[in-house]
Image: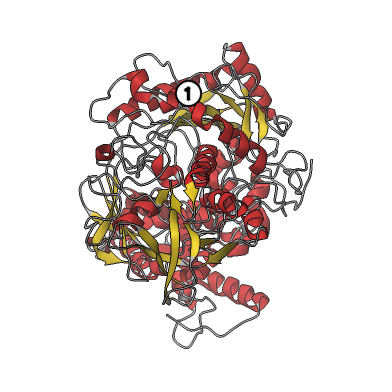
Amino acid sequence: MALKHVNAVVIGAGAAGGIVAKELAVAGLSVVLLERGKWYSPFECRKDDLRNQRVTALGSAFGPDDERYVRVFVDAKGQEHLVRPSEGNYHNNAACVGGGTFSYGALAWRFMEKDFRMRSTYGAVEGSTLEDWPISYQDLEPYYEKAEWEIGVSGDDSKNIFRAPRKKPLPMPPLPPSREHQLLKDTAELLGLHPFDAPMLRNTIPYNGRGACMRCRWCVGFACEVDAKNGTHNTVIPKALATKNCELRTECVAKEILTNAQGQVTGVAYFDTNDRLQEQPADLVVVSCSATESPRLLLNSKSRLFPNGLGNRNDWVGRNLQGHAYAGAYGLFDYDVYDDLGPGASVAVCDYNHGNPGLAGGGALANEFIRLPYNFTTIRPPGAPRWGAAHKEFMRKWFKRHIAVHGPVQEMPAFDSRVQVDPKVKDYWGIPVVRLSGLNHPHTLEVAKYVALKAETWLKEAGAIQTWLKMPGRGLSGNQHQAGTCRMGNDPKTSVVNKYCQVHDVDNLFVVDASVHVTNGGFNPALTIMAIAYYASDHILTTWKDRTFR
Amino acid sequence: MKKSKRLSRRKFIKLAVSVAASGSAISCAGTISPWRFLSIEEAQTVEAICGQIIPADQDPGATQAGVANFIDRQLVGYLRRYQKAYREGLAGVNHTGLARFGKKFVDLPAPQQMEVLTALDKNEAPGEIWKQRSAKEFFDLVVSHSMQGFYGDPRHGGNRDGVSWKMVGLSYPPIRGRLR
């Protein structure tokens, strides 16, 4: 049954979708913003260390639910497993208004210039689809700035000599340092590194009508109880709704994108809150469902003209799934380094993002987010007991006397790390589910080892009496930094969208989320996703005229 | 799954403690289990196992923290998919106790209980059930749930009075809306 026609349907109210919906609505387009999840309040699942978006021992707090959602995960031996959202191999991000931005740790880096030119900088990496982006840092610079000021970023990167150039400073200052931050900062300077205050999408002073961070220990994975954590749910989405041009429909699950005989998109078929199938006609569709769900939707949108799914003439939809290869180290100290001041992840260095001898790329290093007691139960030196009296003593003795330093090492994209749709398994709504397979590229692990050793050196110099490494595995990467599956490129044979996030050969279809990242930087991707959303919206509005594209 | 009559929390704790203290003297026939899923004997076994995973020392251990209560409660809640694993796994632990030392797990002295658990951890445990089910997997599950029930938020039924948080030196209850 067809609903009233609108100019645009944006699917997914996350980091990108929220911004696109607002930009289009402010410009006067009629927009329907579809979101499969709910709109949670900052008070839901308060401080629940067993049920949040990071620790899912008792479920994923901000979606999706284990009852109606399932995926197929193919392990390294080729065996299939049915996995639920609360399991790691599902590679979940979130399902709610705000998407991952509702509960993330909120690190807000800009990528560096070389992050957009990985192939030109490092050459081909054998077995990897490492490639340059079709756009440069300079193309995104004004949009990074827009995101920093509209969504709200605090911090201070002036001491980071490696940073890409910026025109405007950050709108908010950093938080005063915690004990661990001060120690690591002083040590880094002694080592000749260039520590700086990590940028965060977090209020440190009253901003955008909300107060400042209260420095609690429940940050990454939790909703912010004082609403100081900035995401699209408390900035651009309310603005979009206030224009009266945008309608947000929550708990609506997209089934497929509809096309006509001319190969143009005509709207979206979705299941509403009562599980009834609806058809929303529109002039253009923007897919912002995440790097696992966006390719799924494209692949499930089959028609006579697109027998393998939209944008998939050359089998690049769902390919090159990336996340980050977290690498670092732990250190034990002989005095209390913990002062209960959150959120952590405050002092960073970019000395190891690029120019590491013989290695492609690298990653930013910073202190970890503050750890709760339950988080610490699995942290221990190799070979240490994991239960019994000795483990209890370890917890008691070292909980306040340990520091963790790690960072998101940039991965070498692999063609066979991919998202497909399963031929047999369907979700609650009868929609074929995501099928995940692939491995990390070996060179990624080499880079990770180098970065981990640097983290260990930092901790040793800081006075750690014992250190050990934390290394990623060889398995498929994605999870909450998932990216890469609808690659941006100039050549339709080796990409899915063009440099404006427009699907090749389908003018009125856009993918605007981390799926378009060619490579994923050595940084948490949220601010880059937001910048791309502003950038793509700008292009849509510039070329949009009378319900078509010029 | 057994149905249990609704008891007030105080009565439930009193009954559970007295039942645990009486050991195997109480027969299950005719006795309503105060637990939601576990039988009285199963709960005693869970308490004994968790009491070795996180023993009492100068600070309270799993027993005082109510880890068994956490496990029992979650087995009819979010962790209900592990009901069969617990039913069979707990029987398996007793099989191992009987095979190694001729007694059920709860009746073994502490050092022998540790030997049984170590055997499970190494996947070298004798017992019929362990031919169909991995001993190590079951033990890992109980370790994992013990950590959740001891170090996790009290709202889920364990970590009574925040004992583990006090042990590591954190304030309890957590300070809400704290500004520094």
Q: In the figure, is residue A11 to the left or right of A491?
A: right
Quadrant (top left/top right/bottom left/bottom right) for the N terminus of chain A: bottom left
The x and y percentages for residue A67 are 42, 69
- Residue A97 image position (x, y, % from top left): 56, 58
The colour scheme is: secondary structure
> Dot 1: few (<14), some (14–19), or many (≥20) neighbours within 10 Å?
some
What residue do we see at 50% from left, 71% from top?
Answer: A4
Looking at the picture, does residue A65 appear above or below residue A506? below
The residue shown at (51%, 25%) is A466
Residue A253 seen in the figure: yes
The relative height of residue A513 versus residue A442 in the rendered view (above or below) is below
User: Which residue was labeled with disc 1?
Assistant: A113
The one nearer the camera, B38 or A162, is A162
User: Is residue B160 at all visible to an observer of this figure?
Assistant: no
Quadrant of residue A178 within the rendered picture: top right
Instruction: Give SS at disc 1.
Output: helix
Query: Where is residue A532 shown, x and y percent of the image?
Result: 50, 40
* In front of the other: A347 or A125: A125
Count of residue discs: 1
Left or right of residue A500: residue A400: right
Residue B102 placement, left or right of A530: left
- In the rendered image, residue B21, in percent from the top left (x then y), is placed at 56, 70
Q: Nearer the viewer, residue B38 or A297?
A: A297
Q: Chain of mark 1?
A: A
Residue type at mark 1?
Glu
- Name the residue at 52% across, 45% down: A537
Answer with the quarter of the image where residue A270 lies.
bottom left
Farthest bottom residue in view:
B30
Which image quadrant is residue A384 in? top left
